[in-house]
Image: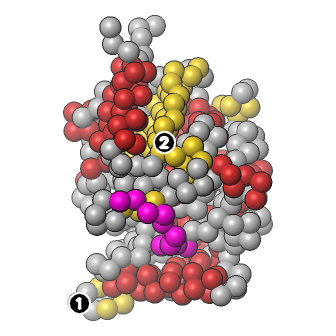
Amino acid sequence: MYNYKETMDKILRSEVESGFVKGASALVLHKGKELYFNAFGMADEARGILMRRDTIIHLYSMSKPITAAAVMVLAERGEIDLWDPVSKYLPCFAGQKVWSDEKGEIPADREPAIFDLLNMTSGIPYPDGSTEPGRRMEKVVQELVARRERGERVDTQEYMRGIASVPLCYQPGGPWMYGFSADVLGGVVEAVSGKTFGQFLRDELFDPLEMPDTGFFVPKEKLDRFAQHYEPTEDGRLIPHLGSHLGEYYEEDVAFESGGAGMVSTLDDYSHFGMMMVSGGLYKGRQILGRKTVEFMTKNRLDASQKAPYHWDSNRGCGYGCLMRVLEDQGAAGTNASLGEFGWDGWTGNYVTMDPSEEFVLLYFIQRCGAGTTPAVRRLRMAAYGALKNK
């Protein structure tokens, strides 16, 4: 007889025993009940710390869905309009130019709007050597990181000014392009709320959702639970990653609160956010977001031309909206997940599935730099959905 727990254990264990990761853990919830949890391997090999349920990991881009939710809190309250230009709240974004390989910097047809940021159609790049704006962004980030390493306080608004100084890769509303859009949304939240982004998240999401281990830094008393993230060498070994490629920094004096890549969390903490999202914004009787707001957040917002660059392996069969993938084609994705399932992943391979039709949340945590969405994720997701019985 099929035993999904044994299957999931085998998948997790094999990822560790093969040396692909140092540690791996997963949690599956269905209608608020736990279907599966297990953890294998090490959170930090040098310190002898095992991967556990309460291990705190670097979320990297799994920060993005939380940032989108924060923006929608403000939208529900009428404090922002999604078609407001970003410069209404962050004046440094006024008058941005667009890069043309033939003409250099040219005027934008219109200013980027908050809606563009939510859908990664703003034209704002990440550091990337393949484009001129990407190369300029790399220089900006390197200088900001260097300043922080020299002891300067380089906060979120300083990053906003640096990001705004770089021309856009495309006209606003153009093709999907992964970049600093989510970080800019964090800056918008600060400007509108009058709070740091971290404090706004604490007040509006983390405290109401009982997420005490989620934030932008790890307190000293919790460092014995903080996972090391590892990067692969050319000969296949895993060594500790010590860099800061997007400005992320996790000590208590953190000033840049990166809405795109800077948060840390645990399985249980993030599962509370996930259960709120699949329950129409409701968590333990408290409405965190409106049901219609969550519906809005979990629809594809890219047309065919915008979706052309959106062809990562992890996005097969998916649309995109509010900083998350949304499943539209099971066959293309090769999954038994429900249509409308949504979520995202992180640079170190961590991954979340949120499925409102089943009130189902799957979390997979690893800490391998550049892992993306691995084949193990698809196998875990298939096994976890296979556990759902007829009701």
The dot on residue 130 is none
User: Residue 239: x percent and y percent?
Assistant: 44, 63
Queried whether the magenta region covers residue 95, the answer comes back as no
Q: Secondary structure at mark 1?
A: loop
- Name the residue nearer the viewer: 211 or 231: 231
Q: Main secondary structure of the magenta part?
A: loop
Q: Secondary structure at mark 2?
A: strand
Rendered residue at 47%/53% (across/down): 367
Residue at x 59%, y 65% (from the top left corner) = 258
Q: Which residues are magenta?
A: 237-247
At which x and y percent is residue 14?
35, 37
Binning the other alpha carbons within 10 Å of mark 2 as few (below 14), some (14 to 19) or many (20 upward) gives: many
Please tell me whether mark 2 or mark 1 is closer to you in this view.
2
In the rendered structure, which disc, 2 or 1, sits on the residue that comes first in sequence? 2
Task: Give the labeled residue for mark 2.
Answer: 41
Q: Please name the residue shown 36% across and 24% down the image.
A: 7
Amino acid bearing label 1? Glu
- Measuring 65% from the left and 71% from the top, which residue is drawn there? 256
Label placed on residue 102:
1
